[in-house]
Amino acid sequence: MNSSASLQAVIAPLEHLFSQCSHSSQQLAQQLTQLLTPLVSAAAPAELASNAFPKTTIENLINRTLSDSSFCSGAGFAYHADAPLNPQAKWSLYWIYKDASHDTALELTPLTHQHLDFRTFEWFLKTKSLKGPYFHGPYVDYICNTSYTMTSAAPIFIQECFYGVAAVDILVSRIEDEILKFLPQPRLKMVLTNAFGRIIFSTLSGYRVGDILRSDALAVAHQHPLFSLYLPA
């Protein structure tokens, strides 16, 4: 099989994987928006505390997101309303992640985990500033799985005000599995990066996951809004 055919064999599965993860985060954001809008509309801004949110319902939405996608390793809701709506700058993170045996719920607040503040994380900041979906990574997730991870996030706006971010994770190892499942032998020499040139996967030595791709020896063979594939020039 020539390099062009080998490349085509992995493009469609990768497009499906990235598109599904992006869709999962956007769908969760839409569901959370619908859930929280009546509560927001009925409360005075200073009265809207995260502990008033319907925790069980939120967790059910997150679990449904995880069950609907075979790619996602975790999902959640990072709440932090804009300052006028949240004068005490309270935040809360509802997160459920999968391990080998079961799903684990993780609920964090400034009181329960003072050294973790997702408001400084790129997937949160970029999603808020862009006011739209954002795909971040790969990066090492030291909170849940200590593995290379990518996060797809979507903002939650209610009455034009920002209330937080819905997000899903996918392990880089899961992306690798998907590529290797469809990549014929002998394996094509290729490098996969995110939209900003950070390496996700490579069959070439010297190209490490997480590094920014800087090489004149490679040329773009396929470009997607969420990823790029490179072959030797």
Image (tube, rainbow, N blue to C red):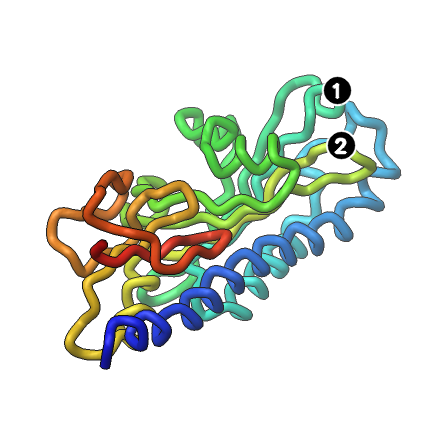
**Local SS, label 2:** strand
Tell me what residue is drawn at x 63 percent, y 59 percent: 61
Whether residue 156 is visible to the viewer of this picture, yes or no, is yes
Quadrant of the frame with the C terminus? bottom left
Identify whether 88 is placed above or below 189. Answer: above
- Under mark 2, the amino acid is Cys
Which percent across, then down, holds residue 223?
43, 55
Find the distance from the CA under tag 1 to the CA under tag 2.
Answer: 10 Å
> Which residue is at the front of the view, 86 or 5?
5
Q: Where's residue 209, x and y in %?
A: 24, 47
Q: Which residue is mark 1?
A: 84
Residue 41 locus on image (x, y percent) = 86, 38
Tell me what residue is drawn at x 47 percent, y 52 percent: 226
What numbered label is drawn on residue 161? 2
Inspect the image, locate mark 1, and give the three-letter code of the amino acid beneath it.
Pro
* Residue 93, placed above or below residue 83: below
**Dot in front, 1 or 2:** 2
In the picture, residue 121 is in which quadrant? Answer: top left
| CB within 8 Å, label 1 to label 2 | yes
Q: How crowded is the residue under tag 2: few (<14 C-alpha within 10 Å), some, or many (20+)?
A: few
Q: Quadrant of the N terminus?
A: bottom left
